[in-house]
Image: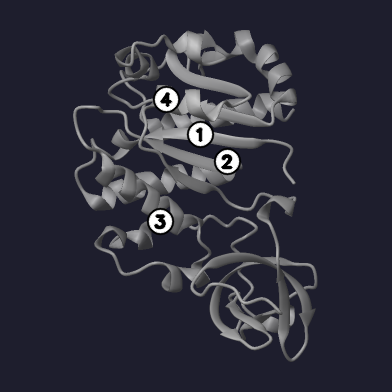
Amino acid sequence: MHDRKLSITIPASVVSDTPHLREKTSKIGLIGRAAATFKIDEIIIYPDNPKTNQKQEIDLIGLLLSYMETPQYLRKRLFKLEPELQYAGILPPLRTAHHPLERMMKKLKLGEYREGVTLSKKLDGTLVDIGVEQTAMVLNKQLPIDKRITVKITRVDHQVEVETVNREEILEFWGYSVTKDEQSFGKILKRRNFDLTIATSRYGSLFSDVAEEISARWRKAKTVLVAFGAPNQGLHEMVRREGLDLKSIVDFVVNTIPSQGTETIRTEEALIASLAVLNAQLHH
């Protein structure tokens, strides 16, 4: 199991300044890839504009990120043909461990983990599609149908047998989960109680000045949140509207792109830059 859970927050307005669905899809593709590259366990999408209902944006971001995270062989079964997925073909593949390219049953290895979807109940168990030419069987368990599950290969013979497992027991990175939150950033922080919270902001301390301190806290933390604002308003402005001061509700406010050359930094750019800096510091 991972020794810590790493979450990030993404504001709903990340897609607001992009009018066309194709460009919105492309932008979410960058975010999904960055999350997988830097082994993010959870992506929290939150509303950042109290003047408008952002449910549509939150649902779109959540749908595209979930679609990306689902292995290709399961997508047809788990997603309907929705208009929001019109440009899903341009989403880049994640190429993570839980997106295996191998589609042949005889190449399966005992002890290998795979994602599957339950197909039908039989007297002796439940049939599951695990992305090879023949269905696998979970013995002696009647599972709900059309549900995604994580399994471990226990037998490869004329019939593939698998057992259900908890994703937590898998040592390698096994994709991210998507949380669609309806509450503001300040309320999420209050409710979720992370061990370590890092907010990114152009008004924050230079990362190099607080890197050692963050490293010390990181080593002890079981749950970590790295928070991102929107291009048109940073986290400082967002929480000020809630009557809060950013520095007093998070552990660190850091600037990971000092002396930026552009007026604003897009959320997906901040995400890649900040996670790269944190990754280099915290895994050396």
The quadrant in which residue 162 appears is: bottom right
From the viewer's perspective, tell me whether residue 2 is left or right of residue 55.
right
The numbered mark, 4 or 3, whose residue comes first in the sequence reads: 3
Between disc 4 and disc 3, the foreground one is 4
Q: Are marks 2 and 1 in contact (CB under 8 Å)?
A: yes
Mark 1 element type: strand
Q: Are the residues flagged by discs 1 and 3 in contact, CB closer than 8 Å?
A: no
Of callouts 1 and 3, the N-terminal one: 1
| Residue 93 position within the rendered picture, expressed as x and y whole percent measured from the top left | 49, 58
Q: Residue at x 61, y 29 (%)?
A: 224
Residue drawn at (32%, 26%) of the image:
231
Q: Which residue is mark 4?
A: 187
Label 3 secondary element: loop
N-term mark: 2 or 4: 2
Q: Quadrant of residue 160?
A: bottom right
Q: Is residue 204 left or right of residue 133?
A: left
Residue at label 3? 91
To which residue does mark 1 refer? 8
The percent coordinates of residue 174 (x first, y second) are 63, 53
Give the distance between the C-alpha atoms of the residues marked 2 and 4, in whole angstroms: 21 Å
Q: Could you tell which of marks 3 and 2 lies nearer the N-terminus? A: 2
Local SS, label 4: helix
Q: For marks 2 and 1, give the CA distance.
A: 7 Å
Instruction: Quickly name the residue at label 2.
Output: 40
